[in-house]
Image (tube, grey):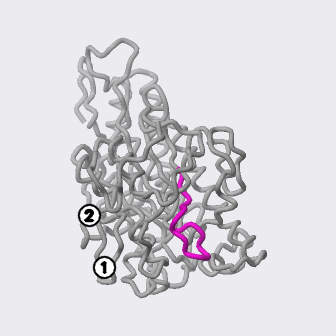
Amino acid sequence: MNVLSNEPLSRRTVLRGLGATITLPWLEAMTPRGFAAGGTPKPPVRMAFVYVPNGIQMKHWTPATEGADYEVPDLLKPLAKFRGDFSVLSGLAALQGGHDGGNHAPAMGTFLTGVQPRRDARCGVSADQFAAAKIGRLTRLPSLQIGTQRTGKFFCDGFPCVLTSTLSWASPTQPLPTETSPRAVFDRLFGTGATPDPKKTDTRRSILDTVGDEAAALGRKVSTDDRHKIDEYLSSVRDIEGRIQRAEALPVPKLPDGAVWPGDKIPEEFAEYVRLLGDLMVLAFRADVTRVCSFIFDAEGSVRSYPELGVKGAHHDLSHHGGKADMVEQILKIERHHATQFASLLERLKSVREGDGTLLDNCMVAYGCALGDGDRHDHKDLPILLAGMGGGSLKPGRHVRYPANTPLTNLWLSMLDRVGAPAPRLGDSTGPLKGLD
């Protein structure tokens, strides 16, 4: 770090210590000289794609009316306090021509690509990686791919199993692995290199202990507001680090059938696992380490069980309920639980002040999957939410219904345009989605 008291801080100012590099959030001291009095530079727009598996019970998800005054349906009630921060988008479809077999593996493969996955593991370039190729040079990490346990050899539907656990494709033949270890993600964000290497960080001490002197020196040179912002940000880093260390100290948890062990210990409860990964995404966006993230709540075809919810049976099995009331009741508990985790993520994004608004205001966060009714493997009316204001280019808080079979990729085109990575076409897209602003 090199701080000059009479010059604004560089947006790339970092705190360095042994094996650690901590990028700072936006500070008042980073405002360029001569900027309009009382104003702040416009923060960058970030984009994230959050995926949930096995479809959604659509009649419990879709509002009955359009516009801003819709009655909140059952599965959106965990998100009710944020209804002004997201829109429900109905009528979007994944591949108008249908999937090969219409089931789980091609569903995840097509979600961000709009391309029919093939059984030789060919797919298409995903929306997040199109953005990373265009704007990734502006940040230390072009993109971040995170998620919970990878599925092994279970419910791959005759496709290569990489399709059930991969959202991000750099090319039709290059799937990008999903990082499932919170420790590895933490090291990527705050280590000295882009490749995780736990040996570079002394896990017996807090990473903040290695940058304490630089943090104290910076605190003496900035305003009180900036000092409070730095303290709060570093406290968030320490909290996440502590939670990772506590998870590592616990016994190895029982994994879902077919899951692949990531190498590092993970939280035993799904909610804490997702929350920890979500907090790491928030830190990455906040410090502008990356502006693009894909986040898999669980792999497609997941057979995870949820005993903490009192649910009997595996997620995938319950999704094929055949209309049986007891099974529907069980899967609704899982889907509400997922929505609750997404609400928690929105809350953390909204709690961060940035510029004249919040971090959420400067994000576009899509939530959903490429199956509608999981019982039928329907992909023609998908459960899709879009949260955030995209830096002021979106008008959330509504239910918008589009004509049947409108390509989901049209939404991705609109998001790419707003993040500064316009694309002429993506997969089966027919043009940017209208009615978002």
Residue 121 is labelled as 1
Residue 314 coordinates in the image, percent (x, y): 63, 79
Front-most of residues 152 and 265: 152
Position of the N terminus, as image quadrant, is top left
Magenta-drawn stretch contains 170:
no
At x 44%, y 77%, the residue is 105
Looking at the rendered structure, the secondary structure element under dot 2 is strand
261 up-or-down from 381: above or below: below
Residue 204 coordinates in the image, percent (x, y): 42, 60
Three-letter amino acid code at disc 2? Ala
Magenta-drawn stretch contains 374:
yes
Three-letter amino acid code at disc 1? Ala
For the image, the number of numbered tags is 2
How would you rate the neighbour count of disc 2 (Cα within 10 Å): few for under 14, some for 14-19, many for 20 or more?
some
Front-most of residues 23 and 164: 164
Task: List the residue tagged with mark 2.
Answer: 170
Residue range (magenta): 371-385
Residue 209 in view here: no
At x 44%, y 62%, the residue is 182
Residue 266 coordinates in the image, percent (x, y): 50, 68
15 up-or-down from 6: above or below: below
At x 39%, y 48%, the residue is 284
How would you rate the neighbour count of disc 1 (Cα within 10 Å): few for under 14, some for 14-19, many for 20 or more?
some
Residue 295 coordinates in the image, percent (x, y): 45, 60
